[in-house]
Image (tube, coloured by chain):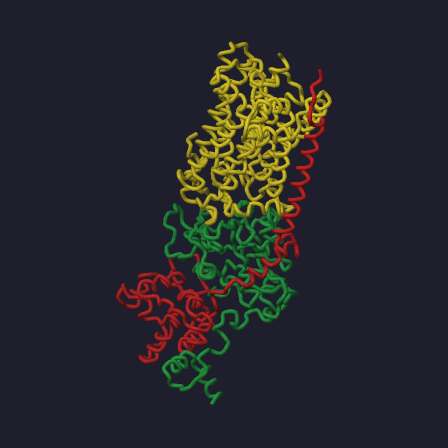
Amino acid sequence: MMKGIEQEISRDRRAFIKKVLGGTIAGSLLLVIPAGAMELDRIPEQIPGMRKEKGPFITGRKFAFIVDITRCIGCGSCCVADKNEYKVPDGNYRTWVERYVIDDHDNVYVDSPNGGLDGYQEPRRDLPHPVRDTFFVPKLCNMCEHPSCVQVCPVGATFQTEDGFVLIDYKRCVGCGYCVQACPYSVRFINPETKTADKCTWCYHRVRKGLLPACVNVCPVQARKFGDLNDHESEVYKILHQPHVISVLKPDMGNKPSLHYVGLRREVV
Amino acid sequence: MSPEHGAAVATALTNYVFPNDLHVHWSLMIVLYPYITGIVAGAFIVSSLYHVFHIKSLKPVSRYALVFALAFLAFATAPLLNHLGHPERAMNMMLTPSPTSAMAGFGYIYSAYAVVLILEILFIYRPTLVALKKKARGGMKLLYGILTMGSDNLSPEALRVDHKITAFLAAIGIPMACTLHGYVGFIFGGVKANPMWATPLMPVIFLLSASVSGIAGIILSYVVIRRYTNKPIDMDCVRTLIKFLWGCFILDFVFEMLELFSHAYMATHHWEALRDLYLGPLYWSFIVAQVGIFSVIPFIALGILSLVKLSDRFVMKWGSVLSAMILIQVLLMRWNVVIGGQLMSKSERGHAVFHPGFFTKEGIVVSIIIMTLPVVFLWLLSKVFPFWLDDDPAVERQSA
Amino acid sequence: MVPEYKSKSYTHIVWILLVLVVVVIAGVYVRAKVLPKSFGEFGHYRGDAIFDEMNRPIRNGTNSSCLVCHPYIREMHLNGVHHTVSCEFCHGPVADHVKDGKVIAKLPKKQGKEIKRLCLRCHNQIIRARPKESIKMISMPQHLEEKHVRTDHICNQCHNVHAPLMWVKEARAMVGVEEDSK
């Protein structure tokens, strides 16, 4: 009997629930769905072994984020997922997607209406010369090795963990905005609801529970990649060890970002 | 050159501001904060010119300058607290100051400076306060009791010790005043992400403009208060102040222009964006107002007042007008640095727009209130600390 | 005559030093009292802030968290060319749908023009900024004209949104038309 029910569940959980609710399976004690995918933090792990890490720091891994701008199609899935994950207030962006247009006079035109959240439905029609090339560039926290925001935070409310994540203590942040000024990449903002600084965390809470960052998870063309550089089988390791055009944003700032771009163009700031 | 030159052409098509840069986070409050601390530092330097460097002609304003500095110091943190997202956590700055932050030292530098300034005032005013305590009644007697720190001893020995302490406080006060304001300049100058701010000249410019605003504030308020209360104005003092104002302003203006010039001359990859900023959104507030009207005119006119023999009436009248212009110049400079620096997006491809609100939390009305508070407080302080030697009971008694 | 003073010549200096010492001691005491315990545990920050961030609720799941309860969609979605498209991109985060193992609300289904807008986020040829190999691009309304359908057609009238080529392939199989274009 039990086995039968389990089979029934795994075949079609939804129909099963309907049956239960409809009373077709009589006397069922299984109204509570067996622990599994519906508990958000028990969704099958995308980064194996992460849930075993209970300490304050992740051990033995060095995470890197790679954005492949030769793949990005500017759909804005990442922006939508990000806004949903954090309920980011309108007009503030933890991540955004920029559109670059270069004309045959070498002029560069960039735009990012609503941070790319609504996608790019229209081409730019306001340009005087024929377009030579266009591409999209997603932006997010650079997770610097030498983060300016941590350096300038007067109260120690922004900090770098030993595993390289730059996080914010929302309970100690005074909301002075110095980190917003100091970030060379403008990924920070003062959250109008919490009145504290806020920024992309590479979905630290998801990563710690074995899930990929929300934006990586939803990207339909794998333009965003997240992985462990200590794992020589990981995609990020392989990309960084192959002959690609790989760079970081504003390298002259000296911040040493852990966010790498494949196919980064010189026009991108 | 038209105001929109370059800027309009460049921004109409390429104007790209990082989405998070569209909002200007450091508002009018952060314009007022260095303005107020600058006035504090400048006024203290005026007092030190007499107390440490023995410029005798500044004796009439030497004590007033300290009280003036205190009145502004008391409200230096008001705009900051109003600006913070969580003012109730402001003490975190004192509890856990980050050793790497250019901002974290402010709490301690500000507090230490406040202690030095208050002690300096109490020691200099002690004979006066003791005399006033004898005359006072009720609450005022209690207040003077606290301010005299439980001592009515005016023996030559006590006064000799007082004098030593005063000289020491004034001496350490100068580097502290310079530190306080040079440091405020470094809060901006240390932001490498902002090419307009990130220059080693920034602390120097802030310090010089602080001296300028402090001296100008003393000249203007001295002349206005003395005239309003029908008391004679010491023209030797005013003329000396004007000379110092001119001297400091020469340095200040030259360094401000030098900064702009070196940006333009070196023409790094930042320059295009900076030029568009100066010629675009900052054209009226920087080029026309700060430089054209409120720097060039006082620069020349102060030179004339300092070098040409002119009547007392003329010097008094125009000295006050030019001081007022200098005060506006420094305010404009704070605006152009603080707001201007944020208008240029870190994309270096465009600029944001900023219009201060009128009745908003950090708007114009609140700014006016915050700038009025030190003046009101100065008036209250005048009831406790006689500004001038000619209404000081201790001085009267000595001369009598 | 030298006036008599009640206090000594250094009384006020003693008082000042006393006040300063008291202020410093009070400051040190208050700091020790109000400082969070985990502050400075790992660095100049509150160590527990790491756990605060770690325990932030997850709102987006993964496709598997959706498909486990929707096997019919699962079949279509995973076998179609849209298998890399996120469920939650179109439908919203699973946290708005399921909480503590119970369905708390229905997620909205996009309708009509909204569907077309969603499709064109990725497939609009005219944007031009897209790598040619990665996905199929179409121009509107030329695509509808080519296919000889009305230009007010919505994409999902021909394409199953979960498996865009499913119906197209089925129709071709039924009428026996060879694939003429890719």
Q: Residue at x 63, y 51 (%)?
A: C33
The image quadrant that residue A54 belongs to is bottom right
Q: Residue at x 62, y 57 (%)?
A: C47
State the image coordinates of residue A142 (x, y, percent, origin top left): 56, 54
Q: Residue furthest bottom?
A: A1
Residue B275 appears left or right of C23: left
In this view of the protein, which residue sits in the foreground, A83 or B238? Answer: B238
In this view of the protein, which residue sits in the foreground, B161 or B151? Answer: B151
State the image coordinates of residue A52 (x, y, percent, origin top left): 61, 70
Task: Write down which chain is painted yellow.
Answer: B
In this view of the protein, which residue sits in the foreground, A216 or A197? Answer: A197
State the image coordinates of residue B100 (x, y, percent, origin top left): 64, 46
Give the colour chain A carries in the figure.
Answer: green
Q: Residue furthest left?
A: C150
Please tell me whether residue B345 is drawn above or below residue B317 in the rendered image: below
Q: Is residue B249 visible?
A: no
Residue B357 appears left or right of A166: left
Give the colour chain C carries in the figure.
Answer: red
Q: Residue furthest right?
A: B157
Residue A59 appears left or right of A224: right
The image quadrant that residue B397 belongs to is top right
Please tell me whether residue B87 is drawn above or below residue A44 in the rendered image: above
Q: Is residue B348 visible?
A: yes
Q: How many marks?
A: 0
In this view of the protein, which residue sits in the foreground, B184 or C118? Answer: B184
Please tell me whether residue C95 is drawn above or below residue A187 in the rendered image: below
Q: Residue at x 47, y 49 (%)?
A: B20
State the image coordinates of residue C98 (x, y, percent, origin top left): 43, 70
